[in-house]
Amino acid sequence: MRIFYKDTTSVLLCFLLINGFFIGNNLNSTFLVIPLALLFAFFLKNNYLYSLKKIVSSRIFINLFIFLTIILITNLVLILTHQTLDLSYAKNIISQIIQLICIIFFIAYIYTAYPPVEQISYSIYIGKLICITFFVQSIIEIIAFLSPQFASIIHIFYSPDQYEILYKSYGGIRGLALTGSPGWGLAVGYAYSFLFYVRYMVIEKFNFKTFCFGLILVLGMFFAGRTAFVGIILGIPLFLFSKIQLISKLKIIFLTVLYSIMIAIIVYFLFFDFLLILEQKVFPFVFEMFYRLEHTGKLETGSTNVLLEMWNRDIPEGVELFGTGLFTDPETGRYYLQTDVGYIRNYLFGGIFWLLLIYSFSLFIFKKSLNYSVTTNDKLLIIFNLMMVFLLELKAMTASYNKYFFLIMIVYLFSLYLDKKNEQIQYNYSCL
């Protein structure tokens, strides 16, 4: 019963932390982690404040806090120097500093619930928590897709713009998740969750239950956005390069094919109506590129065409070193120069100087993660996570900006830190 309590509360805190959905106008679910972690820890009757103090005084937390503060100060100096007073970027950095504090309370709770004496691997535990968070999110999306009444409850936590832009304009296919970032952010989160699924569930112990878990994740991707499938694209080589026996890899591949055929037959005969709904409403969006190839002979989507247009921008002169100090168009309130490409938007804001600073922070996170990681498979996961962020940056703001990227990577970094700090890792044991 005690383990059930610890795991259930950990999943709840992780869901609230990562998804950050809005409750009212000003309250974000991420902020609820602080009071709830204190409350849940009280019933454990362990020394939560000791764990919190240990995490807060750690060098990694101090370094992250200082780095973010430097980024914020630099941001403010840029907008003051350019006299733009565009605070839209600075607000996101302030939000990240607050999120970092919330992460500390979450990590301290995990450390209190499972102290070093229990000899668990924090990275495995956190990795599975991340997967479960998106599994729960997928269940919410599927129910919301099938039930407009349930979707209307989810939309209580949406702004009017989010509801119109995603749910209404996509015909009820998107805008179904319980999150504060139902567009690009959610898709990024799903992409990362699949890499964690491959590392901490497929490679560790693959069976029919694990397969069904992954299938639900993939269904969740259908409603999150096509960018989420980058996780599958990178997840395949992550699995192939992983350090497990060849016979185990072949067994997993064989079982995946076998389970896929079984599920396809079951769905076709028992859930044909659901399959028909997917075929009529969801597949044309998810596989738009192939539908267009069949009908027009062109391998493209509406979003890829928009992306190509965003790359085709005339860069103002004199922005090379320190940019323009503009992140948002002062007249329209939209992206400056109508581009959301991460590399271009950061370059326009602060030039090469800002690019080096902002990407140095992302590289710092990954470098520390590599330093703290112990196993080859963990190191592979970190490398593929790094590849992912710079690939996603080709489409939109991700590195050191996207909420899902920031929260997942920092939480995982702290889990690796705790493993390294305690040097008591048992990779065959997991509470979840």
Image (cartoon, helix red, strand yellow):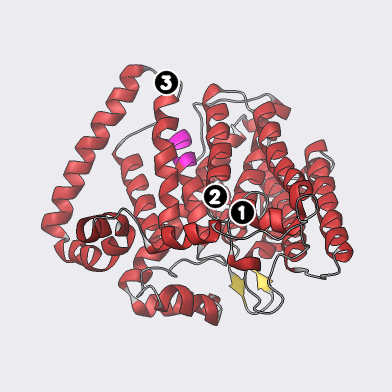
233, above or below 216, in the image = above
- Is residue 59 visible in the rendered image? The answer is yes
Nearer the observer: mark 3 or 1; the answer is 1
Determine crowd level at label 1: few under 14, some 14-19, many 20+ residues with C-alpha closer than 10 A: many
Residue at image mark 2: 394
Check if mark 1's residue and mark 2's residue have beta carbons within 8 Å.
yes
Q: Is residue 58 magenta?
A: no
User: What's the magenta bit mostly, secondary-structure-wise?
Assistant: helix
The image quarter containing residue 298 is bottom left
Report the amino acid beneath label 3: Ile
Is 353 placed left or right of 37 in the picture?
right
Report the amino acid beneath label 2: Leu
Name the residue located 27 percent from the left edge and 36 percent from the top edge. Answer: 256
Determine crowd level at label 3: few under 14, some 14-19, many 20+ residues with C-alpha closer than 10 A: some
SS type, badge 1: helix
| Sooner in the amino-acid sequence: mark 3 or mark 1 | 3
- Is residue 38 visible in the rendered image? The answer is no
SS type, badge 3: loop
The magenta-colored residue range is: 195-201
The image quarter containing residue 234 is top left
Is 355 placed left or right of 431 in the picture?
right
Image mark for residue 342: 1
Image coordinates for residue 413, horizontal then vertical, percent: 66, 39
| Sooner in the amino-acid sequence: mark 1 or mark 2 | 1
* Residue most extreme to the bottom: 160
Is 297 placed left or right of 102 in the picture?
left
Image coordinates for residue 257, horizontal then vertical, percent: 22, 36
Residue at image mark 3: 244
